[in-house]
Amino acid sequence: MKNTRIKVAWVGLAAAVLLAPFFAARAAIESMLPQVPAKPCGTVTVAAASDLTFAMNEIAGQYQKASGCSVQLSMGSSGNFLTQIENGAPFDVFFSADIAYPKKLEAESLAAPGSTYLYAIGKIVLWARNDSGVNVSKGFSALQDSAVRKIAIANPAHAPYGRAAEGALRKAGVYDSVKSRLVLGENISQAAEFVESGNADAGILALSLVLSPTMKDKGRSWNIPENLYAPIEQGAVVVLSSKNQQGAKNFLEYIKLPETAALLARYGFARPANASSGGRH
């Protein structure tokens, strides 16, 4: 009987020794994930600018893993989302490509007071497919070539990236010579689709989309000098009519974590000065 106990003890000890690296590795992985306080949150409905498509999918996945709360994403034009929220659309959090929109919602008492947060600075690039023949390394002068028949940008009427593109073309002094060849996407993702599919010869796109897994190896880009367009300050806000205020606040707090800011930086978003402090803009 004594020998049996000793044998069982040795088996247990051996198993513990063998499994120790597994549990240590698991604990190391979990420790790298930003943790969210365990509070009731249910499903968080997020309206986000389409330049965030790939970054936000990754963020939502990590958030769900870290918190156990689900995230429902809707991607589109910031201006269109603004109008929808003003008309009662049931979103919990709004991630705009222009911080002016969240500020407007706060001013209209349609967003939680004091919740507007500057989460990223966006950038634009001139992009063309590898097989297009457009030499984007020449910058905007490449667009002067008559062989470039269509140039895709987001619609400046409601898409901040479209306004940045138009502003850059105007400041560079080439807008008048290319305006007849501009094709407007409903949002920056659609503009990217125009160029990626070959329906446009070149496009002025969000750096975040150009760096995405689906586009990064398919074309060439030229970084548009930042002095040619106003900074694309991107802001988020908690929608006042949210049915899940606590979940919305938790998700926005998650966006403020350094780990999330680092993820956004991988997609080409500049880190705002307030990202480390969680402050407002």
Image (tube, rainbow, N blue to C red):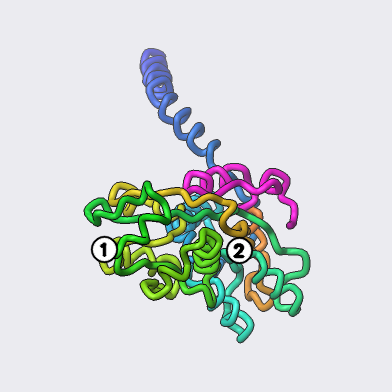
Which residue sits at x=65%, y=48%?
A: 272
10 Å crowding of disc 2: few (<14), some (14-19), many (20+): some
Which residue sits at x=56%, y=51%?
A: 226
Residue identified by numbered label 2: 41
Amino acid at pointer 2: Cys
10 Å crowding of disc 1: few (<14), some (14-19), many (20+): few
Indicate which disc, 2 or 1, sits on the residue closer to the N terminus: 2
Check if residue 198 falls in the magenta segment: no
Q: Which mark is residue 57?
A: none
Magenta extent: 254-281
**For the residue labelled by badge 2, is the local secondary structure a helix, a strand or a loop?**
loop
Split into 4 quadrants, where in the image is the N terminus?
top left
Split into 4 quadrants, where in the image is the C terminus?
bottom right
Amino acid at pointer 1: Ala
- Residue 95 appears in the rendering: no
Percent from the top left, x then y, of residue 276?
Answer: 68, 43
Q: Which mark is residue 147?
A: 1
Percent from the top left, x then y, of residue 41?
Answer: 60, 63
